[in-house]
C-alpha cells in the first residue's frame, strides 16, 4: 500500500474514532450527527410487535380495577441525601404517569441514614406507602478479601486512560448485582421496578406492568439496550464461561445467548440491558442459579479489579439462566436516562400521550443499540 493511502486510512480511523467517542459522551453531538437526523429518516421497529402488552391489560381512565387486583410489588430507588432534587423529579413523573392510579409502595435505600428533610420532601409527593432503608455495611462496602493495592492500581489506570466512571461506582455495582434483593425491606415483595434519580418518563401508563410480568411469567423487563464499555469488563466473559462450564445444568436450554454473543458464546459482544430501568422478579435474583452465578463472579474480584457493572451482570444472568421468553421489552414505556432514550412509536405513542419525538430521538435502532440483536432472538 502506498504512503498516501496509508495516511488516508489513518485520518479516517481517527475521524471515526472521535465521532464514536463524541456520540456516546455528548448527547447534543450524538443527536445532531445521527444518521437518522442527517438523512431525515429513522429505522422502524419490526412489523411483528407481538411482545407488546396485550389489550386486556390496558384500562380506561375511569377504571378502578387496580383496587381489586394487584401484584406483590414495589418501586425501588437507590439514592443518597444529596440526590434529592433528582429523586423528586423522577418520583413526580412516576406518580403522574403511573402510580397515582396504582399506588404501589416505594422502598428507598441508602448506605447512610436518610435525613428527615429527604423523607419529608419524598412523602409529600405520593399517597403510596414509603419505606426508607439503610443498606448493611457488608452489602455495600468493599470486602476485606479484595487486594486493595491491585484494586487501587486498576482505578488509577482507568482514570489515567479516561475510562468513563473508571474511578467510581464499584460498591454500587456490586450491591445492585448481588445484594439489593436481599434487603429486609424487599423480603416481602415478589416484583420490583427500579427507578433512578433524574430520569424522565415520557408517557402515561394505562396498564400495570407488574401484573403483566406476573401473568406472563416474565422475570426481566427493560427499555434500552446497548454495549458496555469494554475497558471495564475485560475478564467478565472469561469468568462467565467458567461458570457455564462448571454449571451446565443451570443454563436455560432456550436462553438468549444470541443477544450476548455473535459466535455462539466464544466471545461477548458487550450487549446488555441498561439496568437503570428494570422491572423484574426478585425471586429470580434470589434463586440458586443466580446466587451461584453472582458468587462465582464476586469471588473473581472483577467488581473492584475492573469495574463490572450491574447492567452486564444482570443482563448476562437473565439471558443465560432464564428462557428468552421470560425477557420483555416494554415498548410502551417512554424513558430517558442521559444520554439515551426509548420513545414509543405509532399507536403506542398516541395512546400514552407521549411527549418525546420518536422520529428525532429514539435510541431503539440507533447504530449503537443492541435492539436488533434482541429482535433476532424471536425471528
Image: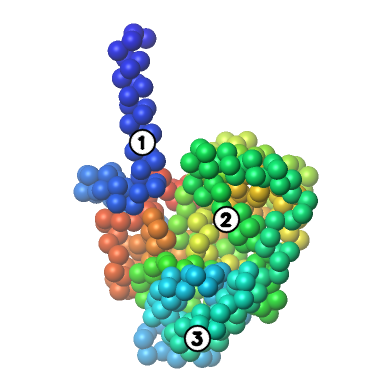
Mark 1: secondary structure: helix
Q: Residue at x 68, y 60 (%)?
A: 141
Mark 3: secondary structure: helix
Q: Earlier in the sequence, mark 2 or mark 3?
A: 3
The label nearer to you, 1 versus 2, is 2
Q: Quick check: marks 1 and 3 in contact, CB under 8 Å? A: no
Q: Residue at x 62, y 72 (%)?
A: 112
In this orientation, which residue lies closer to the viewer: 27 or 161? 161
Q: Residue at x 60, y 65 (%)?
A: 219
Q: How far apart are labels 1 and 3 at the CA level? A: 46 Å
Residue designated by label 3: 120
Residue designated by label 2: 169
The relative height of residue 372 versus residue 87 in the rendered view (above or below) is above
Q: Is residue 307 left or right of residue 52?
A: right
Q: How far apart are labels 2 and 3 at the CA level? A: 27 Å
Q: Quadrant of residue 94?
A: bottom left
The label nearer to you, 1 versus 3, is 3
Q: Is residue 166 left or right of residue 145?
A: left
Residue designated by label 1: 18
Q: Quick check: marks 1 and 2 in contact, CB under 8 Å? A: no
On the question of residue 376 being in view, the answer is no
The tag on residue 84 is none
> At which x and y percent is residue 357?
27, 62
Mark 2: secondary structure: loop
Q: How far apart are labels 1 and 2 at the CA level? A: 26 Å
In this orientation, which residue lies closer to the viewer: 204 or 375? 204
Amino acid at each position: 500500500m502506498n504512503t498516501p493511502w496509508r495516511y488516508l486510512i489513518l485520518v479516517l480511523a481517527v475521524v471515526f474514532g472521535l465521532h464514536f467517542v463524541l456520540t456516546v459522551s455528548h448527547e447534543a453531538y450524538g443527536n445532531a450527527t445521527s444518521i437518522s437526523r442527517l438523512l431525515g429518516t429513522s429505522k422502524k421497529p419490526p412489523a411483528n410487535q407481538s411482545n407488546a402488552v396485550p389489550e386486556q391489560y390496558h384500562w380506561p381512565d375511569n377504571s378502578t380495577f387496580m383496587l381489586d387486583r394487584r401484584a406483590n410489588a414495589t418501586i425501588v430507588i437507590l439514592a443518597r441525601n444529596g440526590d434529592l432534587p433528582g429523586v423528586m423529579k423522577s418520583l413526580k413523573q412516576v406518580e403522574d404517569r403511573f402510580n397515582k392510579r396504582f399506588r404501589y409502595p416505594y422502598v428507598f435505600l441508602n448506605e447512610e441514614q436518610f435525613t428527615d428533610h429527604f423523607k419529608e420532601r419524598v412523602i409529600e409527593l405520593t399517597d403510596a406507602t414509603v419505606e426508607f432503608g439503610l443498606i448493611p455495611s457488608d452489602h455495600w462496602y468493599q470486602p476485606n478479601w479484595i487486594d486493595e493495592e491491585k484494586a487501587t492500581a486498576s482505578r488509577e489506570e482507568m482514570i489515567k486512560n479516561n475510562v468513563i466512571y473508571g474511578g467510581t461506582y464499584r460498591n454500587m455495582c456490586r450491591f445492585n448485582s448481588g445484594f439489593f434483593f436481599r434487603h429486609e425491606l424487599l423480603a416481602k415483595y415478589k416484583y420490583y421496578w427500579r427507578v433512578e434519580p433524574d430520569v424522565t418518563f415520557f408517557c402515561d401508563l394505562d396498564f400495570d406492568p407488574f401484573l403483566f410480568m406476573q401473568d406472563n411469567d416474565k422475570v426481566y423487563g427493560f427499555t434500552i439496550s446497548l454495549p458496555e464499555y469494554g475497558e471495564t469488563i475485560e475478564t467478565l466473559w472469561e469468568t462467565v464461561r467458567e461458570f457455564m462450564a462448571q454449571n451446565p445444568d443451570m443454563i436455560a436450554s432456550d436462553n438468549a445467548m444470541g443477544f450476548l454473543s455473535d459466535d455462539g458464546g466464544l466471545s461477548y459482544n458487550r450487549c446488555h440491558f441498561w439496568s437503570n430501568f428494570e422491572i423484574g422478579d426478585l425471586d429470580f435474583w434470589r434463586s440458586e442459579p443466580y446466587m451461584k452465578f453472582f458468587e462465582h463472579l464476586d469471588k473473581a474480584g472483577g467488581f473492584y479489579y475492573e469495574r463490572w457493572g450491574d447492567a452486564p451482570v444482570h443482563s448476562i444472568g437473565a439471558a443465560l439462566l432464564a428462557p428468552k421468553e421470560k425477557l420483555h421489552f416494554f415498548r410502551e414505556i417512554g424513558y430517558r436516562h442521559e444520554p439515551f432514550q426509548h420513545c414509543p412509536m405509532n399507536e403506542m405513542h398516541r395512546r400514552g400521550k407521549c411527549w418525546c419525538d420518536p422520529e428525532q430521538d429514539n435510541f431503539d435502532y440507533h447504530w449503537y443499540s443492541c435492539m436488533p440483536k434482541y429482535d433476532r432472538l424471536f425471528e
